[in-house]
Amino acid sequence: MEKTEKVLHLKSSRGRKVRVVREHYLREDVPCFSALCEANCRNEGKVLPGDVTHYVVPDVGVVRDFLEVLEFAELRGIVFMQTACQSVQHHRGRRQYNRLRSLLRDPRHNCILFSNEFQTYSYCPREKGESQEKWHSRCVYHAAVWYYNHLAGQKPVVMITEDQEAMVEYSSLSTGVYVISTQEYLQTFWPDLPAANELYTSIAQALRVRESESQEREYVEHLPLEVLEAGIKSGRYIQGTLNVNKHRAQTEAFVRIEGSTSKNSELSSDVLVPGWRQRNRAVHGDVVVVELLPRVEWRGRETALSNGDGEDRPAEEPQSQPMPTGRVVGILQRNWRDYVVTFPPREEVQSQSRNSQRILVIPWDCRIPKIRICTQQAEALQDQRVIVRLDSWESSSLYPNGHCVQVLGVAGQLETEVATILVENSIRVLPFSEAQLKEMPVNSADCPWRVEAGPEGQRRDLRDSHLVFSVDPPGCEDVDDTLSVRELPGGNLELGVHIADVTHFVPAGSLTDLEARSRATTYYLADRRYDMLPPVLSADLCSLLGGVDRYAMSVLWELDGRSLAVQDVWFGRTLIRSSYQLHYELAQGLLEGRGAEEVAELADLPVEEKKQRLGELRRALERLTHVARHLRAQRDRGGALELEGVEVRAQLDAEGNIAALVPRQPLEVHETVAECMIFANHWVAKKIQASFPHQALLRHHPPPRQEFFSQLCESASARGFSIETRSNKALAVSLDRAVDPSDPLVNRLLRMMATQAMSNALYFSTGSCPEEQYYHYGLALKHYTHFTSPIRRYADIIVHRLLMAAVEKDHGAEPWVALPNNKELQEQAQQINNKNRAAQQAQKQSTELFQYLYFRDKDPLTDERCMADAVIYTIRANGVLVFIPRYGIKGGVYLKNREGQVVSVRPDGGCDWQPGMLHRFPDRISASTAQGTHNFNLFDHITVRISVQVSRCHADSLYLEVVSSRPHQCTELEPGGARGPGVQGKSELVQEVVRSAEEASQLEEERGRAPEIAGEEQEFRQSTGVTLYSVLQEIGELALLELAAR
Ligand SMILES: [Zn+2]
């Protein structure tokens, strides 16, 4: 090994130049990571394949400025030189460097890092007087030549650069190594990848303009990092994440204080950052440092209704209270993502581009400021939605700079709008790649898949000993859980929960595993879903269908025959064959002595055998019900909550289409199955926590902050109910009591408010959280995790691996060394939490999208469907928040208009606008005009008219207008009481929108001008079909509380 010195010139965060001398060791055995290597390099891990036409080496400048282009998975055989990577680290900061590192680590991406500066023969010391840029180019070029020679000239090497001089100097220096510009490279080698070419042009343009810009200052400079860190330590500054209020994006942002980092003890609330100057270039989601303003400058938050309001936490204080107010002095971490934007209208483009080369585009997310884009295509992109990334935001620029990445399609079209929702939630769901699908087992008519016995003792065969069955909604195709219950000799009972053994098919670190991990969950939108696992697993081999052999992970409890106390528990891999695939109504029917002729599995049996098997099945269901009642009662004593969750159920016709949505009949069997799943999750949680106290994945549900309940308590007391919120038990009991016999909606709304006040349940690693915080508030359990749905939740896959490791540990094996450590697991937990939040958000936004599309082409003045009954559930300064049961919509209704007129109520209940005033009380708001005074009380039913406010750049919004102070007189017959029709309305809504979107695209095709959507977007739609049904099935899971726990 040879030692030299290396001199670096770095820029400190204050902008000073610093000279750093580092010792530098050279070796001959630096691995090349190529499959073509004939020199016996120790190439461990990812290697470049030999089946590419060339290898490509990007120069320092290319890696620094065009990394996004190199991220296209189609570009294979990329060699990142150490010189280039270090330059990214030193000049582009942590975010870009992390991006590069994750690219290098991602096995789905075909690139490697070559440590050229440690290789004795490819290292070039810097020459006297040589500029850093020239030296870097020389290093990369020499390394490229070394690489070519090392592989004995088997592959041509292409070096790409933005440096004209380097091109001239090196292009003809040696054979086999070509030096060309990035643009030439993309055009020559990747003409079929227009997206990469366009992205290159877009970034290059943005770079050129930035260089030519003036330096007039618009914002105060950020403080240097040392000063920020010292300030946070001393308590002078506060660190937190910037959260912009979407209803008042210009004027209201809050900094949410993180953990207990703040020494400022008087700060229990968020810090208000009032305007864009004080926000000082921070973007929603950034981690910022704020300085508090003097108390006299503190302000309160706005509480009047504003556009699109209605989704806020109910806990807002009236406006009066001034709160800690501050300004941003520095930014610790940018959390920029891809943003969908719209170009300004033609007239505006023309006036803007006269003055500069830049166009101000408007992000779909109102919390994001306008972005300056440099493009000549502004007019061509008029009606399109486009993905944009932010590059920088200098103090000299009023708006941030960015560049275009991809065109999504015409705004307003269903596919564009769905793609927008996915991008805005950072959800990437490309079709499963060929390489991933190659890992999958085959199951076809020619080549049917069969279980293998495997080594003795590794998998318990339950096929002959256990009566296993599943209970699911009708038409369910991914059955991930089954049950069994039987009497043991001696009188004890054995309860069994058997879950699809997904990890048998998905080894840790395989491509399928990595894909599932990055998705983290199956995504359910209003009209489609994107699966976490390829269909051969999710709908076939991992689906515990009736009558076929399947691998499972089982939990078997031995329960005392009388007390039902757990005597013993067994965890492990099993082989099962489910005997019955029941649906809920059928199972409930059997329990009640009906439905025998509906059991398909028994249809063809002789009478006697049928009778005997039926008896067996009934007995099993009865025992299960008995056990579940006992378990539920135990949790109830602990304070388990039943909140507004699953109350809607899809009824499918023979083809599996939604025939109707009906309110959930309170079938006990639902709860029975859910209770068994909760029990399994709970016991698995206990097991993995005991085996791996510092690295087990659990799920906790923190108790809510008391102040979030104030709205709930106030609203309830308006109806004479008192809600106790001291504990989950007290809350559960008082919610049960708050029932108005004349209006079932009152209880439902109160539960809805209670749900809103809750925090989210979250995954965590046991080593990252003190034990007293493991508690699951909603379920009233000390330990909880997710084990029962590995087909559509990655958390369950992790838990299955942990459980198997725990079992092997009991047998003396040491497999747990390969498990993720606490830090890694905590990172994974956070990633899954983020993805779940994104999934929930996307689901909500897609439901709203369907509402807008549904109402968009209806005339609100004449169409009966635009009139609906609405219930007031919150009072605001200038209006009320209402819930519309028919469509499941929540929103604000103004009682005062822009002209300052207020709602005046005629004797027949009809409303119009008159001069007057509003008075707000805790339980009502009164509107007084010359005609008289009318009180709008909490829980009053009123009639509203629904119309759509179309927005060019953002999502549309619904506008609710009060037309009568009385309940809506519905003309049609509404079966099923107050809930039924609403729910039906919602399903019709989705169906109608899908139908009309399909008709529209059909029409376009017939006319021969199909909408231009790139192949990739078309394929975005992985699976269509019966999906609202799936959504509803998922509600329990995606909602805050695991009510259904399935
Ligand atoms: Zn080699």
Image (cartoon, rainbow, N blue to C red):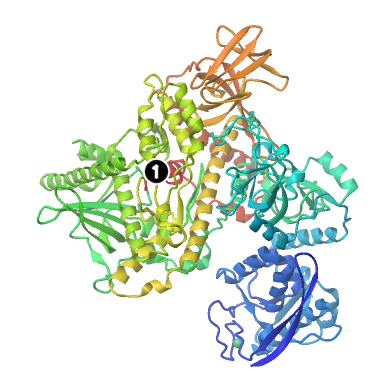
Query: Can you tell which quarter of the image residue 741 is in?
Result: top left
Point out the quarter of the image occupied by ligand 1: bottom right
Image position of 916 (left or right of 471)? right
Q: Residue 377: image x %, image y %?
A: 80, 51
Mark 1, other Cα within 10 Å: few <14 / some 14–19 / many ≥20: many
Quarter of the rendering occupied by the N terminus:
bottom right
Please say if 944 is above or below 811.
above
Q: Residue 920: image x %, image y %?
A: 59, 20
Residue at image x 83%, y 43%?
A: 349
Q: Residue 973: image x %, image y %?
A: 42, 19
Residue 616, visible in the rendered structure:
yes
Image position of 549 (left or right of 193)? left
Please say if 118 is above or below 881.
below
Foreground residue among 423 and 372: 372
Image position of 213 (left or right of 694)? right
Residue 192, visible in the rendered structure:
no
Q: Residue 235: image x %, image y %?
A: 65, 53
Query: Can you tell which quarter of the image residue 600 is in?
Result: top left
Secondary structure category for the residue under label 1: loop
Foreground residue among 953 and 176: 953
Residue assigned mark 1: 778
Q: Residue furthest bottom?
A: 1
Residue at image x 50%, y 53%?
A: 833
Please say if 549 is above or below 646.
below
Foreground residue among 698 and 511: 698
Amino acid on which disc 1 is placed: Gly
Residue at image x 70%, y 68%?
A: 190
Please say if 899 is above or below 336.
above
